[in-house]
Image: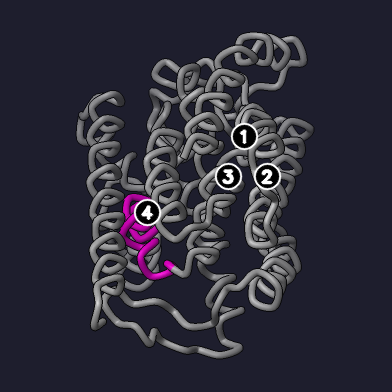
Amino acid sequence: MGRILVSTLVSLVIGLAVGPKFIRWLRSRGIGQNIRELTPERHSAKQGTPTMGGLLILVSALVPYLIFGTKTVIGLVVFLLVFGNGAIGLADDLLKQRRQRSLGLSGKSKLLMQVPLVVIAVFVALHFGGADVRLTVPFVRAGLGIGLFYYVFAFILISGFSNAVNLTDGLDGLAAGAVAVCLFAYAGIAYLRGETDLAVLASSLTGACIGFLWYNTHPAEVFMGDTGSLALGAGLAGLAVATGTELLLLLVGGLFVMEALSVMIQVVSFRYFHKRVFLMTPIHHHFELKGWSETKIIVRFWMISALLAAAGFSLFYISHLHFSLPGF
């Protein structure tokens, strides 16, 4: 428990201490955000805000994990997913800077780059890390076995969450705050399972997100970019795979599911019925166009994320306690 708490504190302090110098470095290099056209008009004021802040998150989390983590196989699998997807996001961010546009790598290119990364990670997790192809259902001991289809399922989960966090990262601090809450829940889940290395990694990422959030809250001094959003989304899904809580992630990370579903619903509705369900997606933009202030949306979405993460952790805890009792 001591290593878990200290790793959180160390990553937080690193983020707070390095943040100002890192932001100045980004400004000196002219590394700024290019705002998409399909966003509310008031977002134009954010043009040029330093981006690629995901590098700060990754470095802040890396140091305490290397110091306090025991580097188990399953822990290194999640580590690979976090930093591998961070590298993909970094390539996307660099391409945006080179083109001076909001479009970097195509969605198809990102998926193709994620395929070998996920396949290798899942293979190692299943054959050397103690992961299981059975999907755990709360209060059901046997689980749901899906065999080799698990590779497909894991890819959908990891790729889906990395992109869902990316979609959520549209308001100052929204994604960083929501991810921090979910990572905190997964640090607790890993600890209850006796996976201390995973708990250290999750807590290191939690502290790094909070340290970054200090500079990312409205009005943001820096954005995480795809470097951060892809890494953190993949990290969440990787922790779910590592702890056998893939289905529970849909509850713990329910805010990101909601954001992604809003986009899917909008696309299907407009394509087949020529009608928009929302004023704009992802859904946080819908509420912006409804007249809600950015701060109100962010705080309320944080509250939703916290409630869902707490519900997911509570469900895991009760189920874990249930199977720990004699006779079960």
Q: Which residue range is magenta in the image? A: 245-262
Q: Earlier in the sequence, mark 1 or mark 3?
A: 1
- The residue that disc 4 covers is 253
Q: Position of residue 150 (x, y in %)?
A: 56, 81
Which residue position is annotated with label 1?
Answer: 61
Nearest to the observer: residue 118 or residue 96: 118
Query: Reading the chain from its start, which is encountered first: label 1 or label 2?
Result: 1
The three-letter amino acid code for the residue at tag 1 is Ala
- For residue 74, above or below residue 28: below
Mark 4 and mark 1: Cα distance apart in space:
20 Å
Looking at the rendered image, the quarter that the C terminus falls into is bottom left
The crowd level at tag 4 (other Cα within 10 Å; few <14, some 14-19, many 20+) is: many
Secondary structure, mark 1, is: helix
Mark before the other along the chain sequence, 3 or 4: 3
Q: Which residue is mark 3?
A: 201
Whichever of labels 2 and 3 marks the residue nearer the N terminus, that label is 2
